Image: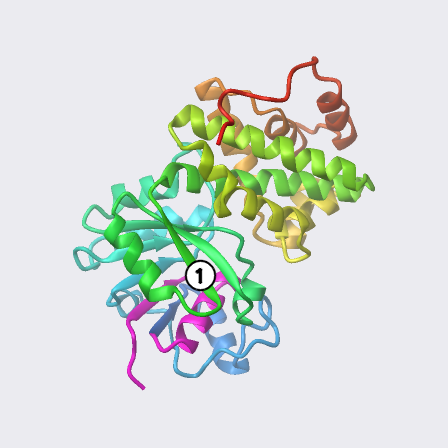
Amino acid sequence: MELKGSISILGSGGWGTALAIMARKYDHDVTLWSPFKKEINGILRFGENKKLLPGVPVPPGICLTTEIEEAVQAELIIFAVPSFAVSSTAKLIADIIKPNTIIANAGKGLEIGTHRRFSEVLTELLPTARVVALSGPSHAEEVARDIPTTIISASKDVEAAERVQELLMNPNFRIYVNTDVMGVELGGAMKNVIALSAGICDGLGLGDNTKAALMTRGLTEIARLGVNMGARSATFAGLSGMGDLIVTCASPHSRNRRAGILIGQGHSPQEAVHLVGTVEGYHAALAGYELARSVGVDMPITEQCWGVCYNNQSPRDSISVLMERPRCHETENEWVF
């Protein structure tokens, strides 16, 4: 078998494992790295990621390792670690990475404290790398099973974005290139907040009308933030905006939605996160709320989600606050295709 390219994936969670399975199926030389021996040994023992992707075989041709030196030799290195680990993982490879290596971040979030997008973090910490952001409606459970999926490869470095497109694209994984990195990353990060909120609505037993309104107005406020910061409004109507919002708010695979359901049913936000695992919307609610305040952008749904998660606010009170806001017109100058 002639291999098409070398790809390393940092992070053996559900998304990292799914990308490794897919890349290997389509004839790539694949390395999957985790800092945790227990995770790697579990995959080696059972032949699958039993916790996060049960029933999906991990091909034996994938190199599974905890040695970071083995994982930095590839042409393309994909970050598939949780948002809180992006910075520490980048620092781990900073002194051993080859110049001009393409780094593609597949996570969706904002750095806590600084509110920076992860392409900014990676560009600063890995100055010789060519940084790309991957985003779009792409649940690991479906990508691992080769179910048709489309995503975005975004970068100011168009050649790097196109190379990621060339390497990863296959008959069941279609990739579009976009140069609006800010819009793509903000859409991917902030839709998690809306999905967490949508889950809360489900947990409260509210209806389809409520969720449709939440998703629509949620997309509006995400676009308002993005356009204010320099993103293109059309990006939010695409895969990393509307597309990712739909799948994350509606799918049973969505950890954000599942955590929101638990909160709506009466669990504390902290209990919900503990029960579900990684819930990016919980962290993004804080970072997004602080970012919106810092740039003077009104994001009422994000503010209410922050209130529930970090200020002991009742979910039902938050619904009332949103429904009783002052009257206004729907159309906004910033939200024009």
Which residue has dot 1 on it? 174
Q: Position of residue 203 (x, y in %)?
A: 78, 44
Q: Amino acid at mark 1?
A: Arg
* 125 left or right, relative to 23: left
* Residue that appears at 62% across and 24% down: 300
Depth check, front residue: 17 or 50: 17
Depth check, front residue: 221 or 103: 221
* Residue that appears at 32% across and 50% down: 132
Seen as rendered, the residue at the extreme right is 205
Residue 72 in the image: above or below residue 26: above
Number of marks:
1
Would you say residue 7 sits in the magenta stretch?
Answer: yes
* 142 left or right, relative to 92: right
Q: Looking at the rendering, which quadrant does residue 50 occupy?
A: bottom right
Q: What element does badge 1 sit on? A: strand
Q: Which residues are magenta?
A: 1-28
Would you say residue 89 sits in the magenta stretch?
Answer: no
Residue 157 in the image: above or below residue 23: above
For residue 266, say whether it is visible.
Answer: no
For residue 52, say whether it is visible.
Answer: yes
* Residue that appears at 29% across and 79% down: 3
